[in-house]
Image (tube, rainbow, N blue to C red):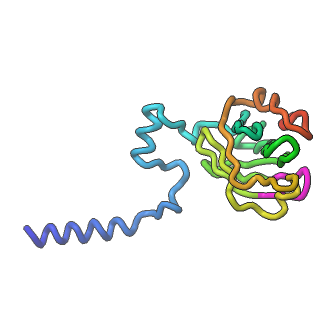
Amino acid sequence: MRHGLVLFLALLLVGCGEGQSDTDKSAAELSPLEQAAIDAGVIPDVRNVTLSGAFERQSDLGTDRFCAVGNDENGYQIGMIAVFGPGTKCEGLGEAERDGENVRITLNSEEKCSFTARFDGVELELPGDLPRSCASYCSRRAGFEGVSFYMIGEGDAVARSTSGRNFEDLCPGG
């Protein structure tokens, strides 16, 4: 009986090594805990949520905004602004493509600035390290690094109502 248990454990370990690593798994695969949270309505299912809509984050310095018009199949037209006081901000227009939780953003209204953000269905988080070209969208002592936005409304109509400072409509088309 003891040798059978040892053999079973050895086979179990070998079987564990043959599966896909976490980085190889499809974005569509969820852990049992994530699936239970989705089923209970605790978190959204990012596979069924669109990026199209308006996002904000408010602070004492101002309101940061992001908007996206479009869909996962054809891409999105986006606009975003991060406010650091009355005269200090970052603001730009561009496009985005979404693949699960990854959102590839390219700002193209100044120097081309491309990076990958993370979207969990509620919050869009920009990375803390961005290409130097992204600084062309910002006034002195401002940056898009690490900025995050929370969805406040879904759909193109809500996104089109998002305003900026230099751009009256951050997401006019789509």
Looking at the image, residue 167 lies above or below residue 30: above
Looking at the image, residue 121 lies above or below residue 100: above
Looking at the image, residue 137 lies above or below residue 170: below
Residue 80 in the image, given as x and y percentages of width and height: 80, 43
Residue 147 in the image, given as x and y percentages of width and height: 70, 49
Residue 98 seen in the current view: yes
Residue 44 in the image, given as x and y percentages of width and height: 54, 36
Residue 67 seen in the current view: no
Whether the magenta-drawn stretch holds residue 110 is answered as: yes
Q: In which image quadrant can residue 34 be found?
A: top left
Query: Residue at the spot x=72%, y=30% of the render?
Result: 155
Whether the magenta-drawn stretch holds residue 117 is answered as: no
Q: Report the predominant secondary structure element of the magenta stretch.
A: loop
Query: Residue at the spot x=69%, y=29% of the render?
Result: 153
Looking at the image, residue 72 lies above or below residue 14: above
Query: Residue at the spot x=88%, y=44% of the render?
Result: 87
| Magenta extent | 107-114
Q: How many marks?
A: 0
Query: Residue at the spot x=26%, y=69% of the render?
Result: 11
Give the camera-side residue of 24 and 103: 103
Q: In which image quadrant can residue 143 be found?
A: bottom right
**Residue 31 placement, left or right of 169:** left
Residue 135 in the image, given as x and y percentages of width and height: 84, 58
